[in-house]
Image (cartoon, rainbow, N blue to C red):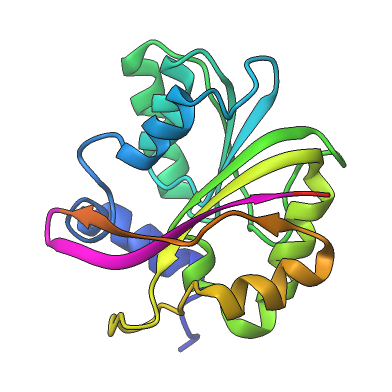
C-alpha cells in the first residue's frame, strides 16, 4: 500500500470539513484588513494568496477590489474556493499547485500573503519556498507572512521567528518590519503565531 501524499492529506481534510475546525477562520483576519486599510497593497497589482485553502482570504481581497490569484496544493481546497468565489460574486484565479513551484511569471506579483502555509513546509523545502517568492514578486513588493511562534506545541508546524525569517528570506535580500505576536483563530481554538511584513529588494 502506498503512502498518502501530502496533497492527498490536505484533500482529505477539506473533504471531511476539518479545515473549518482547525485552520480556517470564519471571519476576515484583522491583520489583513489592517494592511488593506493602511494602503499597503497597491491597487493596480496582482495579489497572491499562498496556500489559499478554501479561498476565504483570496475572496476577501477580491471583495476589496484586488486582482487575486490563490494557489494551494489541495485540489479539493481549490474546488471549494472556486465554488465560494462564484457564490460571493467575485473573480479570483485559483490554481492547484505547490508553493515551491508557483505557476506564475517572474516578477508578476505586487503583494503576497501567507496565512499558515510556510509553517507547515518541511525545513529542507523552505529555501525553495523563499526563492519562489523572490522570483514571482516585483522588486519592492511586500509579503505578509503569518505562522506559528516558537512556543507553539502544535504537531507538524514549525516556528516563524526572527531566526527563521533571517535564514530563509534575509539571505535573499528581503527586509522586514517588526515581528508581531498574533493568534491564528479557528473553530477549535487559536494558534499562537507571529506576523511579519517582508519586502523584496
Report which quarter residue 45 is drawn in: top right
Point out residue 65 in the picture as x, y percentages from the top left corner.
Answer: 51, 12
- Would residue 97 be counted in the magenta stretch? no
> Observer-nearest residue: 4 or 78?
78
- In this picture, residue 199 sits left or right of residue 143: right
Point out residue 3 in the picture as x, y percentages from the top left corner.
Answer: 48, 85
Q: Is residue 93 above or below residue 5?
A: above
Residue drawn 87% across the image and 42% down it:
106
Q: Is residue 16 above or below residue 9?
A: above
Residue drawn 50% across the image and 74% down it:
161
Read off the magenta span.
187-199
Residue drawn 20% across the image and 39% down it:
26
The main secondary structure of the magenta stretch is strand
Residue drawn 77% across the image and 49% down it:
200
- In this picture, residue 92 sits left or right of residue 33: right
> Observer-nearest residue: 7 or 31?
31
Q: Is residue 157 above or below residue 19?
A: below
Residue 29 can be seen in this image:
no
> Observer-nearest residue: 109 or 194?
194
Looking at the rendered image, the quarter that the N terminus falls into is bottom left
Amino acid at each position: 500500500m502506498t503512502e498518502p501524499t501530502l496533497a492527498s492529506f490536505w484533500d482529505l481534510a477539506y473533504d471531511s470539513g476539518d479545515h473549518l475546525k482547525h485552520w480556517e477562520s470564519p471571519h476576515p483576519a484583522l491583520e489583513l484588513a489592517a494592511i488593506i486599510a493602511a494602503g499597503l497593497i497597491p491597487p493596480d497589482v496582482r495579489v497572491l494568496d499562498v496556500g489559499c485553502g478554501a479561498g476565504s482570504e483570496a475572496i476577501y481581497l477580491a471583495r476589496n477590489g484586488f486582482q487575486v490569484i490563490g494557489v494551494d496544493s489541495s485540489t479539493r481546497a481549490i474546488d471549494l474556493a472556486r465554488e465560494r468565489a462564484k457564490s460571493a460574486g467575485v473573480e479570483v484565479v485559483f490554481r492547484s499547485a505547490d508553493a515551491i513551484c508557483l505557476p506564475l511569471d517572474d516578477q508578476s506579483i505586487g503583494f503576497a500573503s501567507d496565512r499558515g502555509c510556510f509553517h507547515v513546509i518541511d525545513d529542507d523545502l523552505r529555501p525553495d519556498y523563499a526563492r519562489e517568492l523572490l522570483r514571482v514578486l516585483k522588486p519592492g513588493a511586500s509579503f505578509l507572512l503569518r505562522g506559528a511562534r516558537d512556543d507553539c506545541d502544535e504537531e507538524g508546524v514549525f516556528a516563524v521567528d526572527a531566526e527563521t525569517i533571517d535564514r530563509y528570506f534575509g539571505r535573499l535580500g528581503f527586509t522586514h518590519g517588526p515581528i508581531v505576536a498574533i493568534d491564528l483563530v479557528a473553530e477549535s481554538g487559536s494558534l499562537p503565531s507571529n506576523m511579519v511584513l517582508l519586502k523584496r529588494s
